[in-house]
Image (spheres, rainbow, N blue to C red):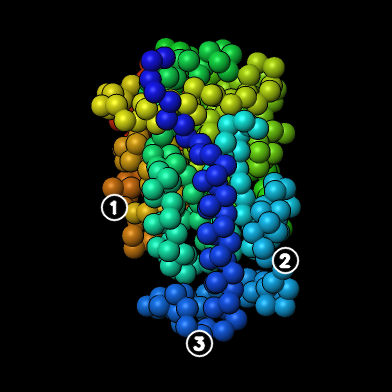
Amino acid sequence: MDMEKASTHFNENVAAEIVKASGHEIREFFSFLNNPQKASAYGSLKNKDQAFQKISQSLKETAIKFENFPQQFSDECLVENGKNIKQAIGYYARIELRRSGQDSGVAQVAVRGVEGEFREVALSRLRPGVQPHGIDIKLSGKASFEFNVVGVNKALPFIYLNHRLKHVLEYMGYTPGSCLNSFKTETVLAADGDGTTYESPSWDRLPLLSESPVLKPLIDFLSLGGVYMIISGNDLGRTKERVDGAIPRDLKNRVILAANGAATMAIYDKDNSLKEVEDYRENAINYSRRPPLKAKTDVVYIGDDGRNHGNDIDGFKAVGFKRSVLVGDWSEDTLIGLKEGWIPGFVASTTKVVSTIVDMVRNRQKNSILFSDENVATMIARAKAM
């Protein structure tokens, strides 16, 4: 390709600056929690008293621990807390340096230690330091925030596949099924991870796809030739851990993982090895800067966060609201365009949607477009009625 490289990853020096600044914010916030009357940037939040009441008891206890053992909250310790993908969720203060390979730089930095609305204070203080490096920050879940290269969000996998789906299918060794041939129809069913494909994690538990009710209809969909893409803000290794044991070996090469906040795309090849799509890392942002192609990918996106600045909103906008299914709760800042495709229930609703899609695949004319406007409207109506 003759495109100039514009990586979805950033270098170690930038990551080190992010760690230093984020570690400072965590310690500053803990000092505020321990002494709310003391002058602090976090005390400037307009509704600080209400926000303070919503802080988890566990985080307040962690802040007390910081007061007694500040050496355990150095930048080095915070990074160490985030290293092990299984054990990291047990630390209420951590910094995760997420990578997809040893020599590809840092895909994402995820920070936990500032909760709720107080995160907006942290973001306002951190942004000026990272914007000159082409880095953006966004909220994640209820207690984290994440740093990614500007342009990396849940829209990017859709933009890339609109240009390069056939390349990805060839790379993963995809073979058509009895009812679906994505080489011809370019069909992809995409969904968020936490709260959509599988349950959201808690501090001591990382729910697996093998435990999710979505698994049965998902295997049916894959067996028919479907391609399923999980787009997760989470670490690639952690996402792999949750998916690996659930999908049969002969179907894994119909699964795409876009993780690290969509900074990394990976596939299971015909040998069941998870491999990064390096072309995505090197060229996806370039594709996003080109004049948009007329959408040719036959796609639907299922997510659980439809808030205006929520985790899934870029994905919903990329596919269009007519091909968006919101399975999370409705809030005052949920975009009204998602109302038609709102099926509340989180993982249970995703199960209904995928089950309905499987029925439609079996009963439609082979190699016809699956997610036409009419078919999607029918799918949503049937799923709502279940």
User: Which residue type carries mark 3?
Assistant: Gln
Quadrant of the rendering where the N terminus is positioned? top left
Please give the name of the residue rendered at 39% of the width and 23% of the height, measured from the top-left corner.
4
Q: Position of residue 252 (x, y in %)?
A: 64, 24
Mark toward the start of the polypeptide (1 vs 2)? 2
Amino acid beneath label 2: Gln
- On residue 336, the disc is 1
Q: Which residue is mark 3?
A: 37
- Closer to us: mark 1 or mark 2? 2
Tell whether 327 sits left or right of 293: right
Instruction: Look at 50% across and 56% down and name the residue there.
Output: 145
C-alpha span from label 3 to label 2: 24 Å
Disc 2: which residue: 72
- Please say whether residue 293 is visible from this viewpoint: yes
The three-letter code of the residue at mark 1 reads Ile
* Mark nearer the N terminus (1 vs 3): 3
- Looking at the image, the residue that sits furthest to the bottom is 37
Say if mark 3 contacts mark 2, CB within 8 Å: no
